[in-house]
Image (tube, rainbow, N blue to C red):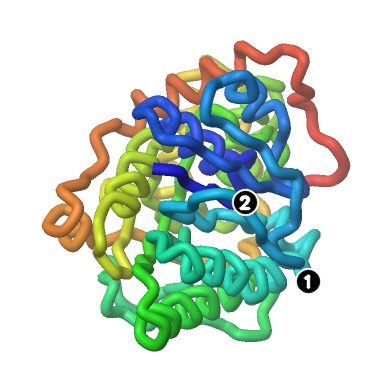
Amino acid sequence: MRVVVTGGAGFVGSHLCEALLGRGDDVVCVDNLSTGSAENIAALRDQRGFTFVHADVSTGLEVPGRVDAVAHLASPASPADYQRLPLQTLAVGSRGTEHALDLARRHEARFVLASTSEVYGDPRIHPQPEEYWGHVNPVGPRSVYDEAKRYAEAVTAAYARHAGTNAGIVRIFNTYGPRLRPHDGRVVSSFIRQALAGEPLTLFGDGQQTRSFCFVDDLVRGIVAMLDSREPGPVNLGNPDERTVAELAGLVLHITGSSSSVRNLPLPTDDPVRRCPVIDRALERLAWKPETGLEEGLRATVSWFRSRPAQPLAAVGPAR
């Protein structure tokens, strides 16, 4: 296939580009580099079948030549990023999704939206099945991301119903692995960075809130399976191995051998208390499930951080 990957220079997007090229697909990577990095795709630049387009999909999306599939991943994805770029986040979730869908419609291509577990908000049903509509604060500090993705799902479903677009939705749960940015504010990257720098690990609340951590290679297999199918979704892609954040902190300290202490800070507004996917639909319809255990994935991620001594690990500005 010839696949357009929006947000292709980002953490997940760059791994997806790599996987698609590895199986023989051509890839058009579209990114404005607001949160993505040219370094993430540096090794792909000279590969046959790879094209990079520096563009903001919120303002339009024109791709010359054949398009067989569109994977729409463009969006700030960490709280630090989408709270720093609130209007851009809303724009890429709305206009950006519409432009990506219109590209797929014009080419009669498969379209896959990378949505998020954040559409469930602070859930009142646990674990979260795809049938759950969510519990989201539409005007809270996280709403620019939550509601942008909820709108993106709505417009994707509308294109499928009314324009006949072959569209599918995946809801991505917490993902980690190599190429996480040290200062992006996600809990895994923050804990690893702080542990390696000898700083206190910032634990929000009492640390008993839960997350389900999926290694990036596993997630990408799920996205590729979705691209290859005609499944409309939504389909949860995540690891149902639910862990407390305090447990994650202890595991990071163990793996890194760090003597860092743990510092408790107030829980952020609207921070979900529990998060865990039901993945029956992914297993039944995509034959997908995660295969990488948390300790194995964390060791690979820590090793990647340690291999990059030029990357600053010390805190930049106040902790959030």
Residue, far front: 65
Q: Is residue 67 left or right of residue 186?
A: left
**Residue at position x 44%, y 29% from top?**
21
On the image, which quarter does residue 141 sit in? bottom right
Q: Is residue 265 left or right of residue 59?
A: left
Q: Position of residue 133 (x, y in %)?
A: 37, 83
Residue, far right: 317
**Residue at position x 37%, y 43% from top?**
219
**Residue at position x 27%, y 79% from top?**
131
Residue picked out by circle 2: 64
**73 to 261, vertically: above or below:** below
**252 to 66, vertically: above or below:** above
Mark 1 and mark 2 lie on one chain; the one further toward the N terminus is: 2
Q: Position of residue 29 (x, y in %)?
A: 60, 42
Residue 160's mark?
none
- Identify which amino acid the numbered label 1 is placed on: Leu
Residue picked out by circle 1: 87
On the image, which quarter does residue 187 sit in? top right
Mark 1 surroundings: few (<14), some (14-19) or many (≥20) residues within 10 A = some
Q: Position of residue 161 (x, y in %)?
A: 35, 85
On the image, which quarter does residue 199 sit in? top right
